[in-house]
Image: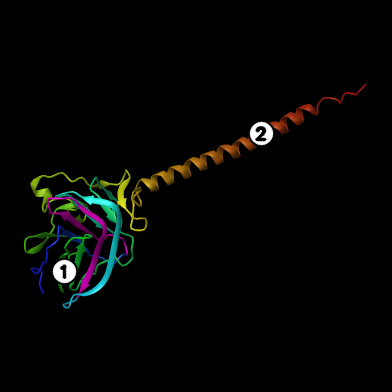
Amino acid sequence: MTLLALLLLGPVYITEVYVHGNERKKGRQWLEIVNVSEKPVNLNAATLRRLDGKDQKEAWRVALPFNDLHLAPRQYAIIAQRGDLGRMLCSDITVLEVKEKQFAFKASGTQSVCIMPDGEAESCSLLSDSKKIEKDHSRNLIPGSWITETCELSPGFFASPGLPLGFCENNIASPWRECSLEAETVSLQTGMKKRQLATGCASTQVSNLTLILLALLWIIFRKGCALYKHDIGALARYASRFPKSKVL
């Protein structure tokens, strides 16, 4: 089986992958999907699975219980281990976060991945053969083969999630940026679309600001206590100068 052996039958295709890395170590693995049909596809209860080796033995199978999430015709989405792609990157592109530990890929060896929406045909793509996958580069699927991305999405990271292959060569602006806003993700654990702060992004900033405010309040409180004790002590010393009056 070679990289040319790509089986694309269903309405949802896997069109880009980033699989380099030690399984889920940094949460950087992801794949790009697109609805190539002319009708919306419901991803609720879709199945994602990985096949390994020349015999394509199933390594894992994950059900994606997204809550009535529809992929419009020609719409792209990213299925990732982390909503920020493990690189603190955010965009308006839909990111479907899968927290299941078995959702992971190998950095080398023969492996395929298949996606099958509920009630639809399955599409499979051979992600890699026995050669080691290029470090810090994604692979884009074009008819018949995978092409390594050469455009730099962020410093030292060459990928085009939700973007056409070679986007920088065509002067297409990337919507990806360092996270400063909430990243739109979907959690497998709840099966519901939710607003989730990307790790290391806005949530970290909010936490740091909260800690700073609490520290300032504590300092003000301590200073206030010290001044109060000082004023009471000074008042007592001043009052001791006068003789005590007798009660008639």
Q: Residue at position x 51%, y 39% from top?
A: 216
Q: Residue at position x 47%, y 42% from top?
A: 212
Reply above or below: 171 against 30: above
Observer-nearest of 63 and 169? 63
Residue tagged 1: 128
Determine if the magenta segment contains residue 44.
yes
Give the x, y percent position of residue 114.
19, 65
Please give left or right for residue 216 compared with residue 178 in the image.
right
**Neighbour class for label 2 at 10 Å: few (<14), some, many (≥20)?**
few
Which disc number belongs to residue 9? none
Task: Quarter of the image for the C terminus: give it.
Answer: top right
Give the x, y percent position of residue 4.
8, 68
Secondary structure under tag 2 reads: helix
Determine if the magenta segment contains residue 115.
no
Secondary structure under tag 1 reads: strand
Reply above or below: 176 against 5: above
Tell me if residue 87 can be seen: no
Please give left or right for residue 224 compared with residue 96 in the image.
right
Q: Main secondary structure of the magenta part?
A: strand
Tell me if residue 234 can be seen: yes
> Which stretch appears magenta?
25-52
Q: Residue at position x 12%, y 53% from top?
A: 37
Query: Number of callouts in the render?
Result: 2
Residue tagged 2: 228
- Label 1 and label 2: CA atoms lie apart by 71 Å
- Which amino acid, mark 1? Ser
Give the x, y percent position of residue 26.
31, 61
